[in-house]
Image (tube, helix red, strand yellow):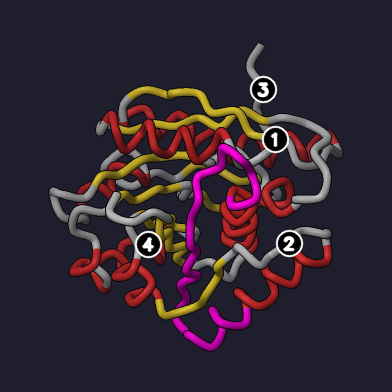
Amino acid sequence: MSSEKLKIAVLGGTGNIGEGMVLRLALQNLMAEGVKNEIIIGSRSKEAADEAAKQDLSELENCGFDTSGITIIGNTNLEAAKAAEIIILTLRFDHVIPLLHDTREALENKIIITPVVPMLKEGDLFVYKPPEEGSAALAIQKNVPASTKVVAAFHNIPARKLRDIAKCKAVHHALVCGDDVEAKKLVIKLTEHMGCLKPLDGGPLKQANTMESLTPLLINLAKINGLKDLGINFS
């Protein structure tokens, strides 16, 4: 990477998963071994992204963290992608491919992290609905430049768990899939210092469909059994 601090764009970063990713990335700047970074929240509206950045900094301060060394700013999705070295997609699947087309010029030689899960609600439960490529991750890979490295991660971490930066009652495993060895190593390193998460190498990108399909399963299990924030812990 080209800078002392990684520039990381969280596209769609005004939603629940985006907010959780922003907070977890920000905390790394306070850890001795954390991956130092600057965070750019992307949104269709720069004003909405700016407001989300202010709210995330306020949340960190309210939890007692020193934010003097933390940079969180807002911008449009395109400008955020242009400025970043790593891009995290935190949008619904039906919004992702159009966004990739709109920002294609900014994706060359970047790392894209996708926690995106294509699923639909049928009745009271959710079902996995992968695209013809077999998974959201493979569809994303098909729609970005050849130089873009796609890594699938964070699918099975509950949004509320990501946003809870004050407590750590349980540790979840975070599965990471990708075909580029160095890109996958970097995402694993990021995950190691997010707090309450333990990364596991999940293999090549073609394995992402298994990871993605676990998300509706966890949501359904929680609903059926009256549980909250189900994640995965292998033992």
Mark 2 / mark 4, whichever is N-terminal: 2
Furthest-bottom residue in this view: 47
Mark 2 / mark 3, whichever is N-terminal: 2
Inspect the image, locate mark 4, and give the three-letter code of the amino acid beneath it.
Val
Disc 1 crowd, CA 10 A, few/some/many (<14, 14-19, 20+): many
From the image, tell me which residue sits under label 2: 66
Mark 2 / mark 1, whichever is N-terminal: 2
Q: Is residue 121 visible?
A: no
Disc 1 to disc 3, C-alpha distance: 11 Å
**Which residues are the magenta region?**
29-51
The image's mark for residue 196 is 1
Furthest-left residue in this view: 146
Q: Which is in the foreground here, disc 4 or disc 3?
A: 3
Q: In what element is the residue under mark 4? A: helix
Q: Is residue 9 above or below residue 214?
A: below
> Circles 2 and 3: CB distance less than 8 Å?
no
Inspect the image, locate mark 1, and give the three-letter code of the amino acid beneath it.
Cys
> Circles 4 and 3: CB distance less than 8 Å?
no
Disc 4 to disc 1, C-alpha distance: 28 Å
The image's mark for residue 79 is none
> Circles 4 and 1: CB distance less than 8 Å?
no
Which quadrant holds the C terminus? Answer: top right
From the image, tell me which residue sits under label 4: 96
Q: Which is in the foreground here, disc 2 or disc 4?
A: 2
Left or right: 227, with 195 as reference point: right
Mark 1 / mark 3, whichever is N-terminal: 1
